[in-house]
């Protein structure tokens, strides 16, 4: 096989190019298959989801989604006969299984918790991170490198290693299983990423802009707000999405420190149980709803992905 | 604690202000540079001290006691280094570390080979490579717990897609093997999912490395009549290596503390065949409630990760200078 690369004087030969494109597309298709399967399973009936051989063609059903959002109870045929006709499609779907909708499930709440904690901690870490990153970028802070390393090193800590004292600490100040507690915790984890990324973005803004503003009589704070912030807007947005994705996906702390009120979706989705075992279409429906926002954000972030995953070290 | 922290911060801010050139400081109306620096860095440091460093110090403290968090009323006493002694002589811990090592070595080997190959292929810039790259990147952004949970479905004997595909191409009965239930297969089950998830990470960083190599180096090599093979070994590989190192170091740190994905896949089972260090730690701390003992183990793990992290930051700075 030829070892030529696109950089060489002679561009990659057409056949190497075709071969590489075929191999990459093959890998991409294999890698996307589990995700497609999640999506498809969400629209299967429970029977279809566990059929052998696995069904690729099936009649789509919304049963998984209905089961995800409701709790149901099984009723006797006699009781079913006494009910008035179902007033919506979801009820009708459930009645076909000899059940009635007993109420909403906890999924909505857990999803909302994910949203509140995700956005809350993202806002806080980006806010604090922007301030700190600006100071690190513009002022000659002594021991700057050590402080930056200290901030990064907090990210390296295994969550379980600090979970014990955080558990004890939260228990004693009444923060366990609260939104505020989780927001603060996720902010503390995210802030290292926010500071490192944002420092990179702010470093790229030429100093001259601010100096001009200072000469024009702006105070340092005004220059920061009116000159630096607008210039850093893209960087701030990219950083925010990274923080949001982290909080959204976080599992270890959520599992250990929350149980009800503030529980987020990741520890909840695997516990969705149907009659006689896991209700896979409902689990898949929950997973689909939970993963779709991240897929959308990943596509949005495409250009900044590299920066985000290397704490801003590798840019292009 | 809080007081000394504030004082420490003030000192930092003061030095910051003193170090800032007077040229800038003169132009201020309103807050001085010293105040701005203090105001801007302060909250972040306070938050990190309160929610990262303080708990860490507490873990160190607990590691010298026989405290049990589920019986906090009973009191506790200091037992010196006995927890550390117990951890280091516990055969379960060594078993756990072996499992972690197996997981690390295989995930890294597979991901480096696959990730580098993919990056190298993508770098040929065929039509539509941007689209396919984005598709390949998706798994690493998703929630490991939710995805890991779903993989248990793919791994079901008989009905699971994974078993079906293997059976289809391998010509064996799909219900004849259980990836998660078999002690020989379970360690590979977690390696496969982690590789599926994190190969794109290595790929993306390698791709950046490949793209950082300036064309003229290859042009010079062509002039010198270096073979493509030679060019690969003496130009491409050495120039991508710092990037690859960075990616591997980061993955080693992350996989050393791997928790969510594997908890949802196997929760350490069958038996304790896939019980990684973090999962063992969670069991000791939150199921057996051996708080002191698990704190000692946590500190040992932390020191290890911290050591690797140090190397990571050095690599980071090296790459940054390029």
Image (cartoon, coloured by chain):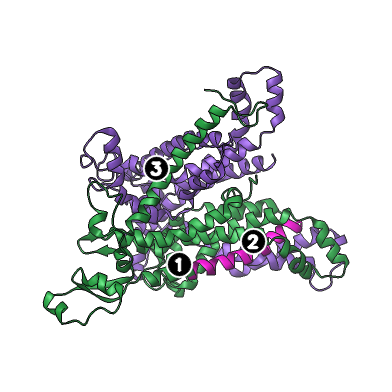
* Distance CA(mark 1)–CA(mark 3): 30 Å
Residue A140 shown left or right of residue B261 in the figure: right
- Above or below, A22 against A150 in this view is above
Residue B100: give its label. Answer: 3
- Label 2 sits on a secondary structure element that is helix
Q: Residues within 10 Å of mark 2 (few under 14, many from 20)?
A: many
Chain containing mark 3: B
* Distance CA(mark 3)–CA(mark 2): 36 Å
Q: Quadrant of the C terminus of chain B?
A: top right
> How many numbered circles are shown?
3
Among the 4 quarters of the image, the one containing residue B209: top right
Q: Is mark 3 in CB contact (under 8 Å) with mark 2?
A: no
Query: B19 or B295: which is nearer to us?
Result: B19
Q: Which chain is purple?
A: B
Instruction: Determine which residue is flagged by label 2.
Output: A236
- Above or below, B192 against A78 in this view is above
Chain containing mark 1: A
Nearest to N terminus: mark 2 or mark 1:
1
Instruction: Determine which residue is flagged by label 1.
Output: A114
Chain containing mark 2: A
Among the 4 quarters of the image, the one containing residue B109: top left
Q: Which residues are magenta?
A: A116-140
Q: Residues within 10 Å of mark 1 (few under 14, many from 20)?
A: many
Q: Is residue A125 magenta?
A: yes
Per the rendering, the colour in which chain A appears is: green
Please give the name of the residue rendered at 54% of the width and 67% of the height, measured from the top-left corner: A121
């Amino acid at each position: 096989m030829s070892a030529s690369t696109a950089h060489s004087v002679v561009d990659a030969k057409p056949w190497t190019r075709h071969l590489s494109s075929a191999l990459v597309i093959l890998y991409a298709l294999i890698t996307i298959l589990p995700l497609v399967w999640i999506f498809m399973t969400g629209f299967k009936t429970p029977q279809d989801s566990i059929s052998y051989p696995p069904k690729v063609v099936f009649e789509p059903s919304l049963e998984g989604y209905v089961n995800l959002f409701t709790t149901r109870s099984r009723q006797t045929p006699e009781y079913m006969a006494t009910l008035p006709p179902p007033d919506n499609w979801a009820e009708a779907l459930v009645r076909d299984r000899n059940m009635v909708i007993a109420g909403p499930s906890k999924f909505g709440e857990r999803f909302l918790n994910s949203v509140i904690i995700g956005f809350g901690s993202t806002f806080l870490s980006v806010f604090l991170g922007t301030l700190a990153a600006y100071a690190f970028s513009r002022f000659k802070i002594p021991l700057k490198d050590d402080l930056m390393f200290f901030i990064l090193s907090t990210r390296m800590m295994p969550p379980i290693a600090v979970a014990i004292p955080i558990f004890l600490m939260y228990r004693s100040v009444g923060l366990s299983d609260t939104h505020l507690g989780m927001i603060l915790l996720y902010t503390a984890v995210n802030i290292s990423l926010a500071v490192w990324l944002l420092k990179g973005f702010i470093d790229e803004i030429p100093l001259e802009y601010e100096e001009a503003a200072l000469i024009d009589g702006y105070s340092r704070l005004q220059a920061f707000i009116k000159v630096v912030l607008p210039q850093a807007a893209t960087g701030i947005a990219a950083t925010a999405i990274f923080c949001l994705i982290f909080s959204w996906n976080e599992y270890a702390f959520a599992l250990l420190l929350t149980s009800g009120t503030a529980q987020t979706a990741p520890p909840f989705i695997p516990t969705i149980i149907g009659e006689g075992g896991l209700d896979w279409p409902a689990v898949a429906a929950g997973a689909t709803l939970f993963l779709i926002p991240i897929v959308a954000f990943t596509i949005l972030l495409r250009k900044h992905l590299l920066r985000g995953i290397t704490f801003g070290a590798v840019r292009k | 604690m809080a007081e000394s922290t504030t004082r420490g911060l003030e000192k930092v801010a003061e030095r910051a202000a003193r170090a800032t050139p007077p040229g800038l400081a003169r132009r201020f109306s309103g807050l001085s540079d010293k105040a701005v620096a203090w105001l801007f860095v302060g909250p972040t440091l306070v938050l990190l001290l309160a929610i990262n460093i303080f708990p860490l110090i507490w873990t160190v403290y607990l590691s010298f006691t026989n405290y049990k968090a589920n019986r906090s009323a009973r009191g506790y006493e200091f037992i010196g280094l006995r927890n550390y002694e117990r951890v280091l002589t516990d055969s379960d811990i060594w078993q756990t570390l072996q499992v972690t090592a197996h997981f690390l070595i295989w995930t890294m080997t597979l991901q480096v080979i696959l990730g580098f190959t993919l990056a190298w292929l993508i770098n040929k810039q065929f039509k539509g490579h941007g689209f396919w790259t984005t598709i390949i990147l998706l798994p690493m952004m998703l929630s490991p717990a939710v995805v890991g949970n779903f993989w248990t479905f793919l791994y079901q004997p008989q009905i699971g897609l994974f078993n079906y595909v293997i059976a289809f191409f391998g010509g064996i009965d799909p219900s004849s093997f259980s990836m998660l239930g078999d002690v020989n297969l379970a360690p590979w089950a977690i390696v496969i999912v982690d590789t599926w998830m994190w190969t794109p990470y290595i790929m993306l960083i390698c791709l950046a490395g490949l793209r950082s190599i300036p064309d003229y180096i290859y042009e010079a090599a062509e002039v010198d009549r270096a073979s493509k093979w030679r060019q690969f070994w003496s130009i491409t590989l050495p120039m991508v290596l710092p990037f690859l190192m960075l990616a591997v170091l980061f993955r080693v740190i992350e996989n050393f503390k791997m928790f969510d994905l594997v908890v949802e896949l196997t929760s350490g089972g069958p038996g304790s065949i896939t019980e990684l260090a973090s999962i063992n730690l969670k069991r000791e701390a939150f199921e057996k409630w051996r708080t002191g003992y698990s704190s000692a183990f946590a500190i040992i793990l932390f020191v290890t990760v911290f050591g690797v992290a140090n190397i990571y930051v050095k690599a980071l700075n090296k790459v940054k200078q390029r």
